């Protein structure tokens, strides 16, 4: 029964997605002006209206057909929301808030001589013009630099009349809505609701005319703090993404394969319509713009995928399986759930924008679908950037926050930085972004990054497919691409459910930087084990002997080193003190350290001298390792008399501190153990008087350097120790380390540092 329930779960998710999408489409068709039901006239109708307008303006057009395309509300045609809020969707569409048809072609006017200029007109679905541009917009800067004159008042008067409806007339010109000196605003007397025409003459005899709702005059617009933050957060997030991308590139911790493939698809989807259109230099600008957007999507995706892969590699397995063709039931479920959630997000976004058009003060910023659907910017761009941003937010959250808070933080960051449904109400826009980001984070956490990418793409492709289906004669190519892509994802998912899971069980080759990260993690783990083993070889407690004080401390460096010390007692009650240092760092060093400690434990007996013990330890080390040499000072101490017998194999000379002040080095040279020709060691007999101390230091103490690479040296600690002879063993140890740290000034020491103090009371 449980198996049957699991097999039906993807289809239940698809049914839920279809239901939410249908609800969003129903609300869009009821409240969004661009979705209003009704048949849009064909291209021929608008081409004839365009030719009629050109004829009345005296513009001679070539015999070729003009370019005709659907268009949405332009950012230059910012509409007064206070007016639109009082209107229904039908009347709002009649004011330019919905679907427009753009027609353009180059032609000649009597006043322009032989220089061709572009006449661009945007029509309402009724065939009435609402926007006119006479001249190439891209030539404005060039004409301005060459001081070419603006359009004459006579040309302006001719074109302005075309934006009037029967029974309307122009009122007296007023100030423009922007800071343009030549811009003028004309009230349209007889319009309902009140409307006006904005005329903007530009250099090169270029002219722009827009018919807009609202009263004439400059419109002061409030700019609340919430809206400012909503606009600033995506910009800040984009800058941080670029910085993180460069950091990952510099550290070679980024994978560019999947991002490169997605960028190539985005570039092809955006440039193909441009290449099939006008073969002019404007086409080059469109291709450059498409390349810039594809590059941005590539950057966001590569950064987000790589960072998420480095902290949660399991979430990217489904993406690797999809790219390498190793789909199975698990991958099939991932794709199906991605399509299902994409349908939910598509319906949710349409519903939010529909409510924004229905609520006061919350009108959508632009149309609900980008028009043209496949121009410089495509639904693929929006989907890849959304999925990549969510992946980056998840990677950062899991990297810096506890696991239980990471999903919430990722949803919050992505929801604020990635606008999902742009509208005038900052609170509605924020809520929509948080819900969409939360659903994508949940999906990626459960089904992997491939599901998140499919869901984000589907969220923008399905509305485009539904819109192009209602205008199939206008958008056949857009319908094929926007509807075919989710269908392809769904077909792959259904096929994956039927394929064998064997391919998914095979380990997919990770990117090169992941191999390096895995190797670094393994080395850090093993180094940590070695460091713990090194500390485990040191005495857990120090001997407590009547009449004697013993203090010892060993500080590990950044890597596993080889400092060691030990205290052993033979059968005659004498104390053996061993202080040594294995050269180097890493595995071999730790192994030789363990061999040395084990050899001392087994070889020290009452009948041998320190020199004999060193010779035996040398043979043990030579048998086990030829890579590391070891310095070792070994002292046999008679606890009753203070008589000491020492042999030294290359370790720094210990310092004997006299209680009354002063001190002397126990100067006994010798070669280190483990390398070179066989050697013999000598013994030196001396006495530790009452109140005196014997201090051993490893070379890590003397060779440690500060920020200016100045070593601590031998003379400074010798002078300090000679002044501490009357203190206890623990006080001598603490004072020496305190002075050593002052010299380092917070700089990390690069070698293990060990100090042992034995004081006779």
Image (cartoon, rainbow, N blue to C red):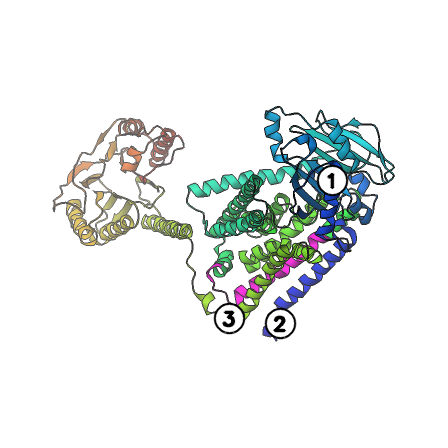
Q: Quadrant of the C terminus?
A: top left
Disc 1 target residue = 55
The answer to whether 134 appears left or right of 549 in the picture is right
Residue 592, image x and y in percent?
A: 25, 50
Q: Quadrant of the N terminus?
A: bottom right
Q: Is residue 128 above or below residue 171?
A: below
Residue at (33% x, 36% y) in the render: 729
- Closest to the observer: 445 or 627? 445
Magenta residue span:
323-350
Residue 607, image x and y in percent?
A: 16, 50
- Closest to the observer: 635 or 28? 28
Q: Is residue 330 magenta?
A: yes
Task: Identify the mark nearer the N-term, 2 or 3.
Answer: 2
- Decide: few, some or many residues near mark 1? Use Cα within 10 Å; few <14, some 14-19, many ≥20: few
Q: Is residue 374 magenta?
A: no
* Numbered mark located on residue 5 in the image: 2
Q: Is residue 249 above or below residue 153?
A: below
Q: From the image, give the main secondary structure of the stretch colored magenta.
A: helix
Cα–Cα span, label 2 and label 1: 68 Å
- Marks 2 and 3 close (CB-CB < 8 Å): no
- Closest to the observer: 667 or 575? 667
Q: Quadrant of residue 233?
A: top right
Q: Nearer the viewer, mark 2 or mark 1?
A: 1
């Amino acid at each position: 029964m449980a198996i049957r329930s699991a097999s039906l779960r993807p289809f239940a998710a698809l049914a839920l997605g279809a239901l939410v999408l249908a609800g969003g489409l129903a609300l869009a068709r009821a409240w969004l002006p661009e979705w209003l039901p009704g048949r849009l006239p064909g291209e021929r109708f608008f081409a004839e209206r365009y030719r009629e307008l050109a004829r009345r303006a005296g513009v001679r057009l070539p015999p070729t057909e003009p370019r005709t395309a659907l268009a949405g509300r332009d950012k230059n045609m910012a509409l007064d929301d206070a007016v639109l809020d009082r209107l229904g969707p039908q009347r709002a569409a009649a004011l330019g808030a919905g679907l427009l048809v753009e027609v353009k072609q180059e032609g000649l006017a009597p006043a322009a001589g032989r220089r061709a200029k572009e006449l661009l007109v945007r029509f309402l679905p009724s065939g009435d013009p609402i926007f006119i541009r006479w001249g190439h917009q891209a030539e404005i800067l060039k004409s301005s630099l060459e001081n070419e004159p603006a359009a004459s008042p006579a040309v302006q008067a001719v074109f302005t009349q075309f934006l009037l409806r029967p029974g309307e007339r122009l009122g007296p010109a007023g100030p423009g809505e922007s800071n343009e000196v030549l811009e003028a605003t004309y009230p349209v007397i007889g319009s309902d609701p009140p409307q006006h025409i904005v005329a903007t003459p530009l250099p090169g005899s270029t002219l722009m005319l827009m018919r807009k709702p609202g009263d004439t005059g400059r419109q002061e617009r409030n700019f609340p703090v919430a809206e400012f933050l909503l606009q600033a957060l995506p910009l800040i997030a984009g800058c941080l993404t670029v910085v993180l991308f460069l950091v990952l590139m510099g550290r070679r911790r980024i994978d560019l394969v999947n991002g490169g493939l997605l960028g190539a698809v985005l570039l092809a989807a955006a440039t193909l319509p441009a290449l099939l259109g006008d073969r002019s230099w404007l086409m080059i600008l469109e291709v450059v713009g498409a390349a810039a957007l594809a590059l941005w999507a590539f950057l966001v995706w590569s950064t987000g995928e790589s960072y998420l892969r480095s902290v949660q590699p399991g979430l990217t397995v489904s993406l690797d399986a999809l790219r390498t063709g190793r789909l199975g039931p698990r991958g099939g479920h991932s794709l199906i759930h991605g399509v299902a959630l994409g349908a939910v997000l598509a319906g949710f976004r349409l519903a939010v924008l529909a409510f924004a058009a229905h609520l006061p003060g919350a009108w959508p910023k632009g149309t609900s679908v980008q028009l043209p659907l496949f121009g410089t910017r495509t639904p693929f761009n929006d989907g890849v950037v959304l999925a990549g941003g969510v992946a980056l937010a998840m990677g950062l959250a899991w990297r810096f926050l506890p696991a239980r808070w990471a999903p919430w933080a990722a949803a919050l960051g992505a929801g604020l930085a990635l606008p999902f449904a742009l509208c005038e109400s900052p609170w509605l826009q924020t809520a929509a972004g948080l819900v969409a980001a939360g659903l994508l984070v949940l999906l990626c956490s459960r089904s992997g990054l491939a599901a998140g990418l499919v869901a984000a793409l589907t969220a923008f492709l399905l509305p485009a497919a539904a819109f192009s289906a209602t205008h199939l004669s206008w958008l056949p190519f857009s319908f094929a691409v926007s509807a075919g892509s989710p269908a392809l994802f769904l077909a792959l998912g259904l096929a994956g459910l039927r394929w064998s899971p064997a391919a998914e069980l095979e380990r997919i080759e990770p990117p090169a930087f992941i191999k390096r990260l895995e190797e670094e993690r393994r080395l850090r783990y093993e180094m940590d084990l070695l460091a713990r083993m090194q500390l485990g070889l040191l005495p857990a407690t120090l001997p407590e002997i009547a009449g004697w004080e013993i203090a010892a401390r060993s500080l590990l460096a950044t890597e596993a080193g080889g400092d060691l010390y030990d205290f052993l007692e033979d059968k005659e009650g004498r104390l053996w003190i061993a202080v040594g240092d294995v050269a180097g760092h890493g595995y071999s060093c730790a192994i030789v350290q363990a061999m040395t400690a084990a050899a001392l434990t087994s070889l020290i007996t009452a009948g041998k001298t320190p020199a004999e013990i060193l010779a035996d330890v040398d043979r043990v080390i030579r048998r086990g390792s030829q890579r590391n040499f070891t310095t070792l000072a070994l002292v046999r101490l008679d606890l009753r008399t203070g008589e000491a017998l020492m042999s030294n194999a290359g370790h720094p000379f210990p310092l004997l501190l006299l209680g009354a002040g002063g001190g002397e080095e126990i100067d006994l040279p010798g070669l280190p153990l483990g390398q070179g020709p066989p050697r013999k060691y000598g013994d030196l007999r001396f006495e530790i008087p009452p109140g005196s101390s014997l201090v051993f230091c490893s070379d890590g103490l003397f060779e440690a350097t500060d920020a200016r690479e100045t070593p601590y040296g031998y003379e400074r600690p010798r002078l300090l120790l000679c002044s501490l002879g009357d203190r206890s063993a623990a006080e001598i140890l603490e004072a020496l380390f305190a002075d050593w740290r002052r010299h380092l000034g917070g700089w990390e020491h690069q070698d293990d540092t060990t100090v042992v103090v034995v004081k006779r009371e």
